[in-house]
Amino acid sequence: MMTRMPMPSPLPVKNGVGPTRLRVPASGPWATIAEYVVARFDHLGADDLHRRFDAGEIVGTDGRPIGRGTALGAHPFVWYYRDLPAEDPVPFHEEILHVDDDLVVIDKPHFLPTTPSGRYLRESALVRLRVRLDNPDLAPIHRLDRGTAGVVMFSARPATRGAYQSLFEKRRVVKVYEAVSARPPGWDQDAPALDGRAVPLVYRNHIEARRGELRVVVDDVREPNAETAVEVRGTGVSASGRAVLHTVLRPHTGRMHQLRVHLAALGVGILGDRRYPDLLPDAPDDHSLPLQLLARELEFTDPLSGTPRRFVTRRTLAEAPAGHLAVGSR
């Protein structure tokens, strides 16, 4: 698989936030680009958008301001900076595990998105790090869900970014996660099984993400495209008094929500998961019970130096049992 290079932006990153790119149709019922933009963002008001055109805040791919009279079809894309809304701060902070000329590796907390999404823009790991390290070139090499904590890698230099991205594309990165679930009824410590299957096990199915959908779609008929090795680390009682099951997960693929879907399918949905196995109503974040999923470690051979690299989280899962009863023991 070839790495697709993103279209270069004519505007720089500002305060850690990159500009927005808008595709403009080549033809349509609008005479000018400005007319299309006003129709596209009619909720913003024509006067404010006209002001932005007049102030030179909306530019073409060449970086030159686009005037109100610029004809539709003159530019396939326009670029601009979004107005930054007020954001509720995420009261948890990323920890930097490693920095060099090419890589930045962090220990991401629960509730912090890796990149801007939804109502989170400045309150994302990417924007925080760009400001903190004064490096507008930072870009994620992979991503974790907002609810998942643990190790995330960022590229510090565009010149070497593709080499590290290709490691993930070619599945040359060993990823290890931990999860905590409610202990299933009838759990047999001497003959451990999940959904009738002896553990350790490898779970496979077909997962498809659809634009605009909160949950992925599972198709049990199509050829599997998602695979996870599952082992049980142990069982016990959590600090909150729950009887829990502590699993170690090694995904061999990287589908959206893969680990959450696979454990839910095995009857041990992750504690704190509001999407799997059941989609719960939208609600404010419950900081007392974050999603009990942790990206524990990443291991790979560095594509530039050829040396082995391994990065391990310093975080733990709040609901992990304090004293494990190992599988197969009494």
Image: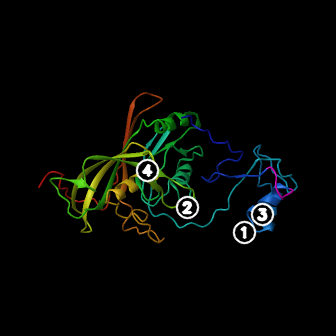
Q: Which residue is drawn at 60% across and 38% down?
A: 4
Q: First in sequence, mark 3 or 2: give its number.
A: 3
Q: Name the residue under label 3.
A: 39
Q: Majority secondary structure of the magenta segment? A: loop
**Identity, as a three-letter code, of the amino acid under mark 1:** His
Q: Name the residue under label 4.
A: 221
Which mark lies nearer to you, 4 or 2?
4
Q: Name the residue under label 2.
A: 120
Which mark lies nearer to you, 4 or 1?
4
Within 10 Å of the Cα at label 2, are there few (<14), some (14-19), or many (20+) other Cα atoms? some
Residue 101 visible in this rendered orientation of the protein: no
**Identity, as a three-letter code, of the amino acid under mark 3:** Ala
State the SS at label 1: loop
Instruction: Give the magenta part as a residue range.
Output: 26-31
Within 10 Å of the Cα at label 3, are there few (<14), some (14-19), or many (20+) other Cα atoms? some
**Identity, as a three-letter code, of the amino acid under mark 4:** Val
Is 198 placed left or right of 226 in the picture?
A: left
